[in-house]
């Protein structure tokens, strides 16, 4: 049994529309680029993160015995506004990336850490 050309074309269009109408599968890397964020390791670090909106470009912030040298913000590939922060204490220097979230500035996950002790 053969279908007339008109019905064959209708089925073809219906099949293409159904196949193209599906949402693309999610990018498995995108959610990982957005999080998880890390919590500050001290109250001083939390205070510095809370003050980042008040620094329009580069600057230095003090909180207790901790200093932070803040670089100018940039737009990351994850479509977030981020900036590099060097936290300086008597124990040493930690360079981290902080990104703006709806809940304020948060530390981005340190993908280069490799689980080394701090």
Image (tube, helix red, strand yellow):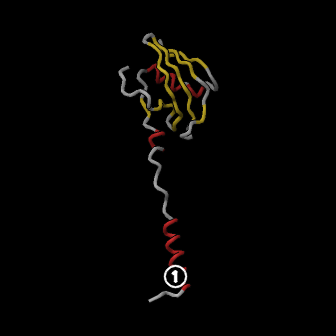
- Outermost right residue: 57
Which residue is pictured at 47% across the width and 49% down the height?
Answer: 27
- Outermost front residue: 2
Q: Which is more toward the observer, 8 or 95? A: 8
Q: Is residue 32 above or below residue 6?
A: above
Q: Is residue 98 above or below residue 87?
A: below
Which residue is pictured at 36% across the width and 23% down the height?
Answer: 116
Which residue is pictured at 52% across the width and 15% down the height?
Answer: 67
Count residues near mark 1 (Cα–Cα under 10 Å), then give few for <14, some for 14-19, many for 20+.
few
Q: Which is more toward the observer, 6 or 79? A: 6
Residue 17, percent from left and from top: 53, 70
Residue 115, percent from left and from top: 36, 27
Report the side of 84 relative to 109 (left or right): right
Q: Which residue is mark 1?
A: 8
Residue 44, percent from left and from top: 46, 19
Q: Quadrant of the N terminus?
A: bottom left
**Secondary element at tag 1:** helix
- Outermost top residue: 90
Which residue is pictured at 52% across the width and 76% down the height?
Answer: 12
Q: Is residue 92 above or below residue 109?
A: above
Q: Quadrant of the C terminus?
A: top left
Q: Which is more toward the observer, 97 or 115? A: 115
């Amino acid at each position: 049994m053969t279908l007339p050309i008109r019905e064959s074309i209708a089925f073809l269009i219906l099949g293409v529309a159904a196949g193209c109408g599906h949402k693309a599968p999610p990018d498995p890397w995108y959610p990982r680029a957005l999080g998880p964020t890390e919590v500050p390791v001290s109250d001083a670090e939390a205070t510095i993160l809370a003050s980042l909106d008040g620094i329009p470009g580069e600057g230095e912030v003090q909180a207790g015995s901790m200093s932070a040298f803040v670089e100018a913000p940039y737009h990351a590939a994850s479509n977030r506004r981020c900036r590099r922060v060097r936290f300086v204490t008597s124990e040493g220097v930690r360079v981290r990336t902080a990104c703006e979230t709806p809940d304020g500035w948060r530390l981005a996950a340190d993908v280069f850490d490799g689980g080394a002790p701090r």
